[in-house]
Image (cartoon, rainbow, N blue to C red):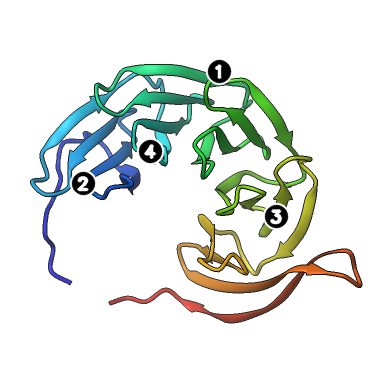
Amino acid sequence: GRCLLMLEGHQASVSACTWSPDARRLLSGSNDKSLRVWDAESGRCLLTLEGHRAKVYACGWSPDGRRLLSGSGDKSLRLWDAENGRCLRTLEGHQAKVYACAWSPDGQRLLSGSNDNSLRVWDAENGHCLRTLEGHQDRVTACAWSLDGRRLLSGSRDNSLRVWDTESGRCLLVATLVGPGESATFDGDQQRVLWASAKAWRHLGWRVHDPAAGRLRILPAEFFGPLPTD
């Protein structure tokens, strides 16, 4: 539990952070509208990425570590070169703040979630919006891809999780939760979903396919309770 490094440089709260695929660098996004790339060993700031016109709420590395993705309160996403910090492309289409973003496992597509209650799937090369996913009744605060890229996961302030088919955009599953959360991801075996909020966490099990119902089926929560404090 010892603190190894303290990375300082942002001028406002840090709202997002993530590791590079090779674990040699870190990426952070801040309310100061910037992102920073850090050396994970020395803690030195390698790059400062500026261009967003509002708070940065989400960020991520491409699977090959060559590009960065960010989502902001200015309603846009930006793609960046991870080596020189140059903005490669601005993705626009959401009608409100972008709270979540994620790369597909093959690095060819992007996923974003917004305060406009929708998700969007984007082409990572040309920035075109490929699909808009609608169904949530409140802001989308979390999103993720399955490891095989065939399914999408979203979490919302409407107290629900949704699983979507990537190709058709069809909603496969809606799981109602006890409260809103801020983070959602698939478990390693892709049979469970991990969901976390500021006050609690939940581990949900679900079957890939229910032949009788012809759709995904949610299983009971394995555990639910306060977040660990130590």
Closer to the camera in the image, 142 or 65: 65
Q: Nearer the viewer, mark 4 or mark 3?
A: 4
CA separation in Å, label 4 and label 2? 13 Å
Amino acid identity at mark 3:
Val
Mark 2, other Cα within 10 Å: few <14 / some 14–19 / many ≥20:
few
| Residue at the (21%, 46%) spot, across then down | 24
Q: Position of residue 33 (x, y in %)?
A: 34, 28
Q: Is the Cβ of the residue at disc 4 closer than 8 Å to that at disc 1?
A: no
Q: Position of residue 154 (x, y in %)?
A: 63, 51
Mark earlier in primary sequence (4, 1): 4
Residue 64, label in figure: 4
Please name the residue that numbered disc 1 is placed on: 126
Point out the image quarter for the N terminus.
Answer: bottom left
Mark earlier in primary sequence (2, 1): 2
Mark 4, other Cα within 10 Å: few <14 / some 14–19 / many ≥20:
few
Tell me the SS state at disc 4: loop
Amino acid identity at mark 2:
Arg
Tell me the SS state at disc 1: loop
Q: Is the Cβ of the residue at disc 4 closer than 8 Å to that at disc 3?
A: no
Name the image quarter holding residue 175: bottom right
Residue 163, label in figure: 3
Q: Nearer the viewer, mark 3 or mark 1?
A: 1
